[in-house]
Image: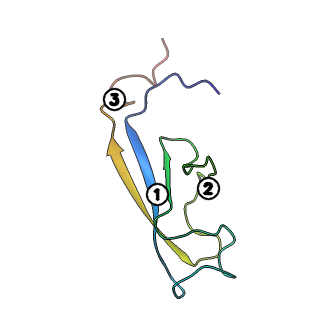
Amino acid sequence: MKKWYDEEYEFQVEVIGYLRGDHTEHLCRNGEEIGDTYRCTYGCPVNADGYGICSKTIVCPDGCVMFRLTAKPLGGENFFRGGFWKEP
């Protein structure tokens, strides 16, 4: 894949708590821990070690981890208002 457009936003997904107690052992297959963060623009979010979660959903597959999604403007031009989507 060759990126040709500098995205307008960066997203951060952070584990902020658990729905079932104070740990995820024997509950969460991914081993998420409070404070784990993932970053992406419009691709798949990955953590500092390069491991990612599905870009189509950011809900814990086992239903036991709460996430926070934060969007940070990067200063790029808006894709639609800037006309990047138009054919040359």
Left or right: where 73 falls relative to 41: left
Farthest front residue in view? 49
Q: Secondary structure at mark 3?
A: loop
Give the camera-side residue of 30 and 44: 30
Q: Is residue 21 above or below residue 18?
A: below
Task: Identify the image quadrant of residue 64.
Answer: bottom right
- Is there a contact, CB below 8 Å, between mark 2 and mark 1? yes
| Amino acid type shown at disc 2 | Ile
Q: Secondary structure at mark 2?
A: loop
| Amino acid type shown at disc 3 | Gly
Tag 2 residue:
53
Q: CA distance from mark 2 to mark 3?
A: 25 Å
Residue 72 image offset from top left, x and y in percent: 33, 45
Q: Residue at x 56, y 82 (%)?
A: 23
Q: CA distance from mark 2 to mark 1?
A: 10 Å
Q: Residue at x 42, y 58 (%)?
A: 69
Q: Quadrant of the N terminus?
A: top right
Residue 15 image offset from top left, x and y in percent: 48, 67
Tag 1 residue:
13
Residue 46 image offset from top left, x and y in percent: 57, 49
Left or right: where 56 falls relative to 6: right
